[in-house]
Amino acid sequence: MRYVLIGTGNISNTYVAAVKKLSGSEIVGCVSRSGHRPQSAPQLECKSHLAEISAEFDAVIITTPNGLHHQAAIEAASLSKHVLTEKPLDIHLEAMDAMIAACKQSGVTLATAYQRRTNPDNLSLKKLFSAGAFGRIYAADLSCKFWRDQAYYDSGDYRGGWAIDGGGPFMQQACHNIDTYLWFFGMPSEVTSMLGTFAHQIEVEDHGAALLKYANGMIGTIIASTAARPGLPARLEVHCEKGTFVTLDDRISYWAIDGIPTPADSAPSANGNNANSAAVTDTARHEDILRDFDTIERSMR
Ligand SMILES: NC(=O)c1ccc[n+]([C@@H]2O[C@H](COP(=O)([O-])OP(=O)(O)OC[C@H]3O[C@@H](n4cnc5c(N)ncnc54)[C@H](OP(=O)(O)O)[C@@H]3O)[C@@H](O)[C@H]2O)c1
């Protein structure tokens, strides 16, 4: 798979490192308005528009800010290139519908990177949820109490604004954990929330709490914050007919479930912790995403 990176900031370096570890894949070019290449790939062909890239390529990896993903995806689809975009897919339903329609029309794969799903403990838990092994689920409480300093928000004009970031920690940092939550429990039937801005000069929230009600009666809570200095590991507590379990940063840390041995993976976490940094230095989960993307694309040929 030959990739072009669209966006060459922070997370583009994670992809440069991850692709290097996969045999048969390479990044052959990048797109940046300012002409900045990823720090870790200064040799890449760099153009300000995708159509100007001279190298042959099969797919794009979109690492522009959240609310711009649809533009790059639609442009790539128009060139019949497969699309892997960083999370979130985009920030408005109409934009996401438009990128899905463009990729369908061109017959290319569209995928988004929620790499925490590939954590071994999350995969084991998903199997147990799908098999109904926990019995009735009463409550699921997710706490994402992270910290970002003002310098993080000041590092990009768009950061902390509604127009392009599309929200605060619910949209930007905790959306990984919320993705896993919805993968386990499905969509709620009712949501209510309270948001506030406390520790930063930004437009969007930096702390909030949501209360969720499910059709099966389950009551959920989600706290998302970038104002909880110095930042705590993400914590999920699940209470069900069979007992209770807890995960910390997507690893099972407490298991009291009747009749089911703990499925905790003994390997050290490759997941990293986004409690106080936006950098993703361990590339293992992004490698999983790239391998999966490659497999889906091959199966469509
Ligand atoms: N999966 C994860 O764990 C993870 C972690 C961090 C970030 N992310 C996601 O990755 C994406 C990029 O985040 P990042 O932290 O890498 O951002 P970043 O460091 O600010 O980089 C953004 C890139 O987009 C380009 N860009 C194009 N149009 C832009 C515009 N109008 N305003 C600002 N930049 C623009 C910038 O280059 P030019 O200005 O030269 O065009 C820059 O290279 C976001 O969607 C974020 O949610 C995911």
Image (cartoon, rainbow, N blue to C red):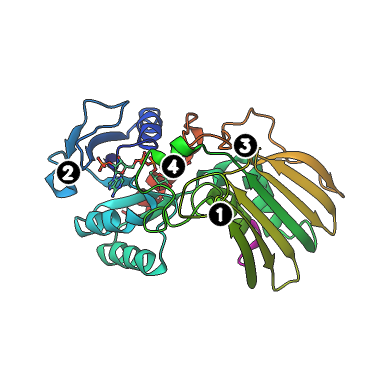
For residue 179, the mark is 1
Mark 4: secondary structure: helix
Mark 1: secondary structure: helix
Query: Which of the marked residues, 2 or 1, is nearer the chain's N terminus?
Result: 2
Query: Which of the marked residues, 1 or 4, is nearer the chain's N terminus?
Result: 4
139 left or right of 69 in image: right
Give the spatial CA distance, label 4 vs label 3.
Answer: 15 Å
Residue shown at the point (24%, 26%) measured from the top left: 42
Is ligand 1 within 8 Å of the beta carbon of the residue shown at mark 2?
A: yes
Q: Main secondary structure of the magenta part?
A: loop
For residue 48, the mark is 2
Residue shown at the point (25%, 46%) measured from the top left: 58
Circles 4 and 3 in contact, beta carbons < 8 Å:
no
Give the spatial CA distance, label 3 vs label 1.
Answer: 24 Å
For residue 153, the mark is 4
The residue that mark 3 highlights is: 229
**Vertical relation: 16 (above or below) 213:** above
Snapshot quadrant of residue 22: top left
Circles 3 and 1 in contact, beta carbons < 8 Å:
no
Magenta segment: 184-188
- For the residues carrying marks 2 and 1, which lies nearer the camera in this image? 2
Give the spatial CA distance, label 2 vs label 4.
Answer: 25 Å
Give the spatial CA distance, label 1 vs label 4.
Answer: 23 Å
Amino acid under label 1? Asp
* Residue 239 seen by the camera: yes
For residue 30, the mark is none
Q: Nearer the viewer, residue 208 or 117?
A: 208
Q: Does the magenta portion include 68?
A: no
Crowd band around label 4 with a 10 angstrom C-alpha radius: few (<14), some (14–19), many (20+): some
